Each structure stands twice: as C-alpha cells, then as structure tokens.
Image: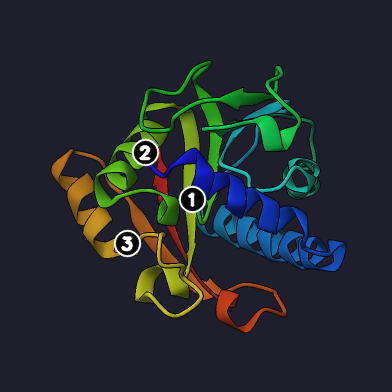
Amino acid sequence: MLSMEVLKAHYKEYATRPDSRVADRERAKKSIVKYVLQKTGFKANKGPVKIVVLGTSDRRYLAVHRRVFEEILGCKTDVKTFDVDTEHLGGESGTEITHDTTKPFPDAPYDIVFSHELMKFLTEEEQLITIINSYNALGRDGIAMHILHNPSILGTPQLKSWQHRVNPDGLISSLKKEGIEAAKLVFDSETDIDWAVKTTVIVLQK
C-alpha cells in the first residue's frame, strides 16, 4: 500500500490539471464504457443501476463518472466511490467512502464495478485481491471492468517510479486458478493524449 504522503502529492497534482484535461478524460471514459458494455452485451435494469468506482484522484471525476454511466445506460444510477482516503474528494459521505479495495466491498452486490488505472497504485498481490473482490461484489448479471493504458502495462516513462506495472495476462491466468473467468479487451479509446489511446480492459461477468 502506498504511503499517504505519496498519495496526497498525487492528488495535489491532479487538482491542478485544467478542466480541459478532465473533459478529455470524460470523453475517453465514455468511449471505453460504451465499448465494453456493447462488446459484453450488458443490459441495465430499469434503474437505479448500482455502481461502485474504485479510486478517484480528483473530485471533479465524481460528477464525470455519474454522467458517463447515466448517458450510456439511459437511466438513473446509484454511484459510490471507494478510496483509501476521501479528504481530496470532499470527505466521507454516503457516496464517497473510505475503503481499502483489498478488503471485501461494503454494501454489495453491485451491478457494475469500475476502475480506471487503479491497478498501478497496487502491488501485484493487491491487484489480484482487488479484482477478486470486485468479482465477489457483483450481483446477478453484473460486470466488473478494470481499465489500463499502455504505460501501466509496458512501463513507459509516463509510469511514475513509485507506481507498479500491471500484467493483464498474468492476472487473468491467476484469476482462472481461483475459478474466476476473465476476458481482455484491447482497443483504442477517444482521447487527445497519445499514450492513453491504446486501452486494455480486464472484464469479469456473473
């Protein structure tokens, strides 16, 4: 687990990014979620669809995530966000919850579990445990999607020295040993950030 000192410096960096960067990431997230849900055939119930987001580095993304899912699903959502610290999100609340994702998720089951580049903040062991927990937290016909970009997988310079590389094929193999089937989707997302175009998503369904 990363130290709070490191994480707070990371949160501070994100908070200084311009709104144009957040808008670009919203466009990317929307293209990714739309692609994954179409490819997997996920069908939302009448709503509200119960969603948990694992990790959010900037409070501006709280509204982004809700907007992305409601626009794509076409219904109301009940979105919670788990983070090891919620101070940067405005503090603990009914929707922003301080939680270590290597522990079983509270208030399960969920229809959708979503993480976007969370894995690089976790060790290899923590990555696997978190993905297993995401699967265990799914309700009937639920879906978990864990989004990665090439720097996290290849270890290119955009990956910071204190962050961890992610091996999606290795994780999928380890999940299979645990009796959990997962798929890997690889495609291009809609973004103006060159290194974030190539997108890999680990997908689990019940």
* Residue indicated by mark 3: 168
Q: In this view, does 49 lie above or below 172?
A: above
Front position among marks 1 and 3: 1
The furthest residue to the right = 19
Give the quadrant of residue 125. top left
* Residue indicated by mark 1: 118
The furthest residue to the left = 177
Q: Is residue 79 left or right of residue 145?
A: right
Residue positioned 17% across, 38% down in the render:
178
Residue positioned 78% across, 59% down in the render:
16
Q: Position of residue 82 (x, y in %)?
A: 56, 31
Q: Which mark is residue 57?
A: none
Identified by mark 3, the residue type is Pro
In the rendered structure, are the residues bearing label 1 and label 2 in contact, judged by CB atoms less than 8 Å apart? Answer: yes
Seen from the viewer's position, the closer of residues 61 and 133 is: 61
* Residue indicated by mark 2: 130
User: Helix or strand or loop: what does disc 2 sit on?
Assistant: helix
Q: How far apart are marks 1 and 3 (CA)?
A: 13 Å
Q: In this view, does 203 lie to the left or right of 69?
A: left
Q: In this view, does 205 lie to the left or right of 85?
A: left
Identified by mark 2, the residue type is Thr
